[in-house]
Amino acid sequence: MVEANRTVVIPLNVPEESRSDFHRTILPYAYCQQEAVEHCWPDTPKQPDDLQTSKQDAEDALYDRLREDTNEQLHSNLVQKAIKDATSAVSSCKTSWENGDRISKPDFYDREQSGYTMTYDKRAATYDRYEATFSTRNGTVTCRYELPAEIEGTPYGEYVLDRRWSFSTSKLVFDGERFWLHAVMQRQFGDEPVYAPQTDDASSDTHNEDTHRVLGVDLNVDGATAVTSSGQFYGNADALNAYRSEQEQLRGELQQTGTRSAHLRFQQRRGTEWRYYDQYAHYVANSIKQEALRVHATHVAFENLTRIRKRISNLPKFQQWLFKKVRKYTEYKLEQYGVTVDATNPEYTSQGCSRTDCDCVDEDNRDGKHFECVECGYTVNADYNAAKNVGFRYLSEELSNPAGRTCSSGQATSQLALVSGTLSLTGDFAECDWASTDKPHPQQASGSSSARAQ
Ligand SMILES: [Zn+2]
């Protein structure tokens, strides 16, 4: 298991009335930091080893007292993090001293610089893709992120919106003027298949006309906007919807004002808003594109939009527009790679069990985002289940349809790109004799040919 960390600096939109909540929280927080420094730093240290640097020792000695001293106004995790900030600072002093540098005792009360930093782990803060909630001594404060105008290619788009990365203990920074989140994004490599980099060998295999590999995509009006059959989740429809209603409200207010300048601002806002949605569609499409290339897909299958309307009753116009854009942009981005983007009938994709040895279709299988097959008990994220079904449906109906695309004879192999390798169908398509390889297998990690069913 390999772990990677990236720090993404995100400007925070702190509500005016909440700024003082942070300014008042830093007081007990700095008190805990400084008390921990006093504990670790004897009156006249003679040598580096006189400095105490064990976080655990300091916590054992101080935690209860500091909780009491601060009247339990600080979240218990903030007390622990303040202690840790102190031991880290003392520890770097110790290292400098060992290297012969001059050192001075850390001073967290130093207010010459008007800024400060507080460390929030996931028990004292909730980190989302579009906002974060911090606990302060006056309760919690939710701050939206100020998003870049162009999401694509920014660290925000690359790490924060990508669900393969998750938030780790991060820092809230006040620089004297404004607030920032130094978000530490973490990703584990190893519990998902690592597809071999494309070698000449692999690429010739991918371009073999007889090999089809389908990436199924499920589009949603809540939760992740797009979910792939390979188990990736892209975008945040809930946050997008929240942004929309916020904008709607703001527009309403401007319209009521009725002045000419309000009208201009209304127009401007409208333009910014639609650029934002367009960027969002680009971001989702780009993620699907990257994933299609990663799994060496030859086809990306979406649900047929006119038919999705039946599945999601009253599919709002905005969502239709967004789905259409996502599909169009995906098509456009993948064109140059020779990957076909197509659509299939979405009927029952959300209710059917995606296990190939089970053909249960039942509306009771799905409860919101939770899928649990009433027949075989298969339990999985409902959107991921649907994405696999979209891919299957496309494989079996479109690719294997003799009247449709030609797949030359018995050598043909069709595969569905899954989270752990691929699911393959060899030979006679009409039989639809699926063979499941949906379990981790070292061979499946290396290119498409080795991923065929045994
Ligand atoms: Zn089942």
Image (cartoon, grey):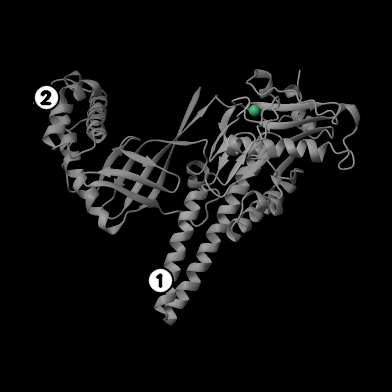
Residue 18 percent across, percent down from the top left: 26, 54
Looking at this view, name the residue that lies furthest to the bottom. Answer: 260
Image mark for residue 253: 1
Residue type, label 2: Pro
Instruction: Count how many numbered circles sit on residues in the image.
Output: 2
Tell me: residue 370, above or below residue 20. above
Q: Residue at position x 52%, y 55% from top?
A: 150
Element type where label 1 sits in the image = helix
Q: Return the residue at label 2.
A: 42
Ligand 1's quadrant is top right
The nearer-to-camera label among 2 and 1 is 1
Whether disc 1's CB lies below 8 Å from ligand 1 is answered no
Tell me: residue 415, above or below residue 443. below
Rendered image quadrant of residue 184: top left
Q: Residue at position x 40%, y 46% from top?
A: 9
Element type where label 2 sits in the image = loop
Residue 395 percent across, percent down from the top left: 77, 36
